[in-house]
């Protein structure tokens, strides 16, 4: 299983499944990270956390702990 946390900068992947539950899952879904959406990893912060992503034309930041809950292909 490959998660969003493992994706290299500059790569574009497709969300397969979301893990987690409750408020964390809701927050991820509210960002537009749902099954089937394409995500591009734009850059990582100097210490590696958070990740900056492009999703549906929007730029957003996501903690690596949350990125580990998003399975991609």
Image (tube, rainbow, N blue to C red):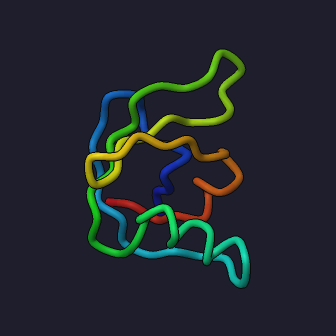
Q: Quadrant of the C terminus?
A: bottom left
Q: Residue at left 72%, top 84%?
A: 22
Which residue is farthest top?
46
The residue lying toward the viewer, choosing from 58 and 40, is: 58
Q: Is residue 52 left or right of residue 65?
A: left
Q: Is residue 21 left or right of residue 28?
A: right
Tell how many labels.
Answer: 0
Q: Is residue 57 left or right of residue 15?
A: left
Which residue is farthest bottom?
22
The residue lying toward the viewer, choosing from 67 and 33, is: 33
The percent coordinates of residue 17 (x first, y second) are 44, 75
Residue 65, compared with residue 1, is above or below; it is: above
Q: Residue at left 32%, top 28%?
A: 10
Q: Residue at left 30%, top 36%?
A: 11
Q: Residue at left 69%, top 83%?
A: 21
Quadrant in the rendering for residue 40: top left
The percent coordinates of residue 26 (x first, y second) are 61, 77
Residue 6, compared with residue 17, is above or below; it is: above
The percent coordinates of residue 39 (x first, y second) are 33, 50
């Amino acid at each position: 299983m490959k998660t969003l946390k493992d994706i290299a900068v500059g790569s574009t992947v497709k969300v397969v499944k979301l893990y987690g539950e409750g408020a964390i899952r809701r927050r991820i879904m509210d960002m537009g990270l749902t099954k089937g959406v394409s995500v591009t990893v734009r850059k990582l912060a100097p210490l590696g956390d958070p990740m900056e992503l492009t999703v549906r034309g929007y730029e957003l930041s996501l903690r690596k702990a949350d990125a580990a809950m998003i399975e991609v292909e």
